Each structure stands twice: as C-alpha cells, then as structure tokens.
Amino acid sequence: MKRPTSGHTSNPWEELRRLTPARIALGRAGISLPTHAQLNFQYAHAQARDAVHLPFDHGALSHALAERGRASLLLHSAAGDRDTYLQRPDLGRRLAAASREQLLQHAQANPDGYDLAVVVADGLSALAVQRHSLPFLERMEDQALAEGWSLSPVVLVQQGRVAVADEVGELLNAKMVVILIGERPGLSSPDSLGLYFTWAPKVGLTDAYRNCISNVRLEGLSYGMAAHRLMYLMREACRRQLSGVNLKDEAELPSLSGEPDRTLAGNFLLAGDHH
C-alpha cells in the first residue's frame, strides 16, 4: 500500500470554513492540529492581547470630531492605569474625582441638560473604538438630530467600563445615554464595538436597565444597521420611559429595496410573534 506523502489528514468539512471566520474544520495531522492552524491561532491570540493593551488614541478621535463640528470632553475613570483597570473593574465604572468635577462644571453651563449624552470609552479594545466609533456616530447623530434631540459633547473616557456612562449621563442631566465601547476581543474579532443604551441614567443601575447592541464592525453588524436598531430603541424608550429587559428590539430591518423587511422583524421568543 502506498503511503501518503504528507501527515496531514484531509477533512471533508473544510468547505464549511469558506462560510465563517469561526475556527471549525481545522483538520489534523496525526493527533494534533496542522502547523498552519496552530500558527493562525497564535497570531489571533496575539492580536487579541494587543487590542486589550493598545492605548486609547483620544487625541486623534477628538481631532476628527472637531473636524465634523462636534465638541468633545476628555475624562478619566477612577482606574489610574491599564493594569489597575484590568484588575479592578469597579474603578472603571466610576469617574475620577477630577473628571467628575470637570463634568459638573460643564453641566452648570447647561442646566437644562440634554436629550442624549454620548460617551465613547476604550473598554477592552481601543482598536475597536478607533476604527468604528466615528463612522457609527456620523450615522447615529444625523438621525438623532433629525428627531430634534439635543446632544451632549462627545464624552471620551479613558479606562472606562460600561457603567461609567450612567454617571456621565446623571451628571449631565441627560434623559438618555449611549456608550460606544470596545468589547472583549475574540480570536476572530479583536475590534468589535459594543453599544449600551440606558434611559434615565444614574449611578448604581445594573445591566438589566441597559440595552446592548454588539459586534459593530465591518465583518459584523454594519454601522447603518446598528444605528437603525439603536434609533428604534431610543424612540421606544422616549415613548415608554424605560430601557433594559422591558424594552425589546423589534425594529423592522430595511431591505435592499428600502422597504421594511417584515420577515426579519420582531423576536420569535415573544408571544404572538410568528415571523
């Protein structure tokens, strides 16, 4: 019997790999992964680690916002550096004392508050924020202004976690707050942007009071679709005066023709929804 010239064992499922970036059908060489699959894994792992530790280039983002005519404020969480941020999640949820005072002074100049406070934080992937926050904001803010909503300056928070937006929104006397934040990197998505929205923000709220839209990036949820979903949630929040688990995303998704695609609308888990 003629022996194969390679130790690589073919996998009939390899065709599935064309359909997803997920690590499936990697094949095997004997009882181990093929060399190229192992090297790809190590490369993806290095990308994820780099994304976590990459410094937040807030200067470039602030400059880009200024070119669009949008003011920004630079604040810092109570986590003084990256190591502290990673080891003390609680400190990333609150503003540093100096930043809190800075925001209070700004709020005094606008005692009527805002309809929507906009926050951008590095989170666990500054790479995601730097790549995707500006193009998403361009789409979302145009629609928010069309609704007649007043917008706060874009609040940039270094070493921030999701809940820091609640303190920002409360201090600014905002009806709603949305935070754009870098999500925890995956082995195929080191630059995934997350959106968290809260009605009537205040310190101490749990995740049950927030709505999340995740995986906003070119290979995931498009900027336009993410803005469409977020605008639906915000309009419903204004109408119903709530957010979180009691506010479901039932937005009708636009089709290529521009008409709502009702076959994709709603949530199949809700009673009476048969889409």
Image (cartoon, helix red, strand yellow):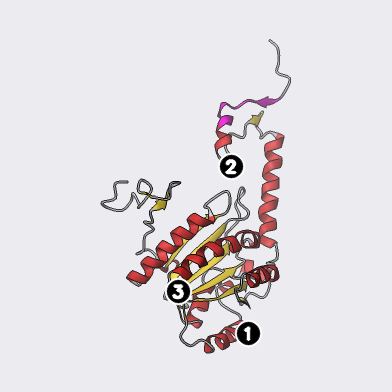
Label 3 secondary element: loop
Q: Nearer the viewer, residue 193 or 205?
A: 193
Residue placed under numbered mark 2 in the picture: 21
Judged by depth in the image, the label closer to the viewer, 1 or 3, is: 3
The disc labelled 2 sits on which kind of residue? Pro
Label 2 secondary element: loop
Residue placed under numbered mark 3 in the picture: 149
Which sits earlier in the primary sequence, circle 3 or circle 2? 2
Q: Residues within 10 Å of mark 1 (few under 14, many from 20)?
A: few
Could you tell me if the residues under marks 2 and 1 are in contact, i.e. CB atoms within 8 Å?
Answer: no
Q: Nearer the viewer, residue 148 or 222?
A: 148
Q: How crowded is mark 2: few (under 14 residues within 10 Å), some or many (20 or more)?
A: few
Q: How crowded is mark 3: few (under 14 residues within 10 Å), some or many (20 or more)?
A: few
| In the image, residue 258 above or below residue 159 | above
Query: From the viewer's perspective, is 44 left or right of 261?
Result: right
Which dot marks residue 98? 1
Residue 57 is situated, as x and y percent measured from the top left of the image, at 69, 67
Residue 233 is situated, as x and y percent measured from the top left of the image, at 41, 63
Residue 197 is situated, as x and y percent measured from the top left of the image, at 46, 67
Q: Which of 84 and 31 is in front in this view?
A: 84
> Among all residues in the image, which is located at the extreme top?
1
Residue 128 is situated, as x and y percent measured from the top left of the image, at 62, 59
Identity of the residue drawn at 57% across and 83% down: 103
| In the image, residue 275 above or below residue 242 | above
Identity of the residue drawn at 29% across and 46% down: 274
Q: What stretch is highlighted in magenta?
A: 7-15
Question: Does the magenta-highlighted stretch encompass residue 10?
Answer: yes
Which sits earlier in the primary sequence, circle 2 or circle 1? 2
Judged by depth in the image, the label closer to the viewer, 3 or 2, is: 3
Image quadrant holding the N terminus, namely top right
